Image: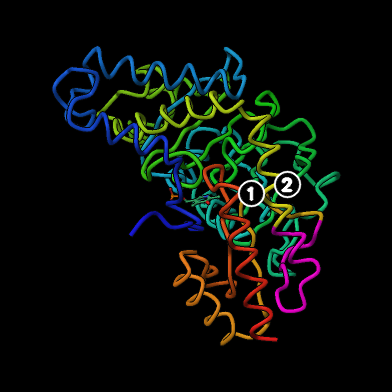
Amino acid sequence: MGRVYNFSAGPAVLPEEVLKEAAADMLDYKGCGMSVMEMSHRSKMFQEIIDEAEANLRKLMNIPDNYKVLFLQGGASLQFAMIPMNLMKNHKADYIVTGQWAKKAFAEGKKYGDCVAVASSADKTFSYIPDCSDLPIREDADYVYICENNTIYGTKFHTLPNTKGKTLVSDVSSCFLSEPIDVTKYGLVYGGVQKNVGPAGLVIAIIREDLIPDELPESVPTMMQYKVHAENGSMYNTPNCWAIYICGLVFKWLLRNGGLEAMKERNEKKAKILYDFLDQSKLFKGTVEPGSRSLMNVPFVTGNEELDAKFVKEAKAAGLENLKGHRTVGGMRASIYNAMPMEGVQALVDFMKKFEEENA
Ligand SMILES: *Cc1c(COP(=O)(O)O)cnc(C)c1O
């Protein structure tokens, strides 16, 4: 069997070119006689891999010099704790709760200080992004936290919240490198890479240097201190070498393909094919308010659970995999990350048309 169109929310599709490159390098990376998985992280060869990855990420995202790029472990979920542990000086933070991941981060934050949900879209099953232009942000809040693209519900902040001068912290796991962002608008922007960038188990945190605390309470584990990772070039301990290498290949792939401006244009075109179909379909319905729609994760339903299950099953048989929606939303979800080709989205829409005719 060949490759399928994989609509998984994460771990998710990676560029075929990158997988082939990694396969070709597998046994003997650049003539060194071993794979990247087998080499010392202290070797010159690996230092070049991580340095080049960082340099290319800086180029792609136009990251200013006063920001550190950290390659960390524990996934995005460990950041839910690391953020309050490192950034809470007043022990107060304001969270905008737009889905499961924001909710989890909020719950974790509460373990370390006084956290308040200043906005939420829980009233309508997280199907929209609330108006964040004038929120009751507290005077002494250490930061305002958002999950910028809500992987499960398929919503995206198209305008960043007005934080009233407070530090913005953003989880961009599922929209990482899908379009250009202005890094200077964030104090800390981070993402688990397994949605749009690379293999699971690596999270990239981009943090403004002045936010990295010099001193933390004794009880904060060494591995949970941004300072330790920043001072050791993300190699205080053995990093996720393999994931860093693959991300490095993806960064080069992005640069070869026009960078983030080109990605945005392509992602908008891809998403439009699907949303345009959903907007006129008599069977399928998108679940998100049009103004809050994500370019990356597109949930939809037929309104009939049996029919949803039939669709997922038949789609799989047709080579369109992982379309089942998240257990909390039901229905279907198509994740159409950077590496999903236009043809994949077109094949999905063609299949939906056919299914609609057959099940009218
Ligand atoms: C998947 C996801 C996470 C959790 O990532 P892990 O690496 O599994 O911890 C957090 N936030 C968002 C937005 C996600 O999509």
Q: What residue sits 47% from the left and 33% below the top?
A: 204
- The residue shown at (20%, 29%) is 35
Q: Quadrant of the N terminus?
A: bottom left
- Residue 281 lies within the magenta run: yes
In-image side of 109 versus 232 (left or right): right
333, above or below 296, in the image = below
Q: Is mark 1 within 8 Å of ligand 1?
A: yes
In the rendering, at what x and y percent does residue 190 appear? 53, 36
Callout 2: helix, strand or loop?
Answer: loop
Which quadrant is the C terminus positioned in? Answer: bottom right
The number of numbered badges drawn on the structure is 2
Mark 1 falls on what kind of element? strand
List x then y, in percent, for residue 120.
72, 59
Q: Range of the magenta residues?
A: 274-290
Which residue is labeled 1 in the image? 149
Tag 2: amino acid = Phe
95, 238: nearer the viewer: 238
Tell me whether the residue at label 2 lies in contact with that at label 1, contact meaning CB atoms closer than 8 angstroms.
yes
Foreground residue among 192 and 132: 192
**Which quarter of the picture shows residue 165?**
top right
* Disc 1: CA contacts within 10 A as few (<14), some (14-19) or many (>=20): many
Q: CA distance from mark 2 to mark 1?
A: 7 Å
**Residue under circle 2?**
157
Q: Going by the image, does 341 lie left or right of 49?
A: right
